């Protein structure tokens, strides 16, 4: 509750509807499996592909979906995704709305907590992003907004 009060009270001074200036997101991993043949003969083939899907939302605007190969996104992959896809999409929404966007980072994965990622977020969203160990700390064990 303290987190919500702090965020809403701080942002309400600058923005009458602070939730419209908040980027929340979710990542989900999928495994696609298909076997060819009856599985009993030598030479039968198996198709196995894993993908992670990132989708965000700012107010009523969707960001993505963006796809990353593999079931567990690594810090390097996440940083590329931020630089090349996520942040440019957020900047476009900022220009459209004429306001700065807060970025919510839950910090559940090691990719979210890597030094390169947090340094990048600090440079792109100074005092405008929150996670587990930021100025406006995202509380542990809480559902996403």
Image (spheres, rainbow, N blue to C red):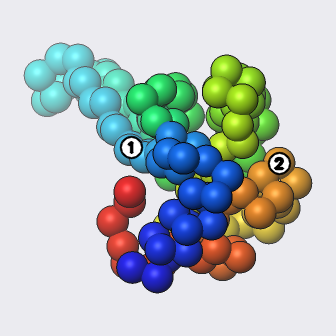
The image quadrant where one finds the N terminus is: bottom left
> In which quadrant of the rendered view does residue 91 lie?
top right
Q: Is residue 46 left or right of residue 112?
A: left
Q: Which residue is mark 1?
A: 29
**Could you tell me if residue 107 is visible in this image?**
no
Residue drawn 23% across the image and 24% down it: 35
Instruction: Establish if 57 lies above or below 119.
Output: above
Measured in 3D between alpha carbons, the distance from the residue under mark 1 to the one under mark 2, in whole angstroms, is: 26 Å
On screen, residue 118 versus residue 110, left or right, reads right
Labels 1 and 2: the sequence-earlier one: 1
- Location of residue 31 with respect to 104 vertically, above or below: above
Q: Is residue 31 left or right of residue 52?
A: left
The image shows residue 10 at horizontal and vertical percentages of 62, 66
Please identify the quadrant where the C terminus is shown. bottom left
Residue furthest to the top:
37
Graded by Cα atoms within 10 Å as few (under 14), some (14 to 19) or many (20 or more), the crowding at tag 2 reads: some
Between 104 and 71, the one lying in front of the other is: 104
The circle drawn on residue 124 is 2
Q: Is residue 118 visible?
A: yes
Q: Nearer the viewer, residue 94 or 67?
A: 94
């Amino acid at each position: 509750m303290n987190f919500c009060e702090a965020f809403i009270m701080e942002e309400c001074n600058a923005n009458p509807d602070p939730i419209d200036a908040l980027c929340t997101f979710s990542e989900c991993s999928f495994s696609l499996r298909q076997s060819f043949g009856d599985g009993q003969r030598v030479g039968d083939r198996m198709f196995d592909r894993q993908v992670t899907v990132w989708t965000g939302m700012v107010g009523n605007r969707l960001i993505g979906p963006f796809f990353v190969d593999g079931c567990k996104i690594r810090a390097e992959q996440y940083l590329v995704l931020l630089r090349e896809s996520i942040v440019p999409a957020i900047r476009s929404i900022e220009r459209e709305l004429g306001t700065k966007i807060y970025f919510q980072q839950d910090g559940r994965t090691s990719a979210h907590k890597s030094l390169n990622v947090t340094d990048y977020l600090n440079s792109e969203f100074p005092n405008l992003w929150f996670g587990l160990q930021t100025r406006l700390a995202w509380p542990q064990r809480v559902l996403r907004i």
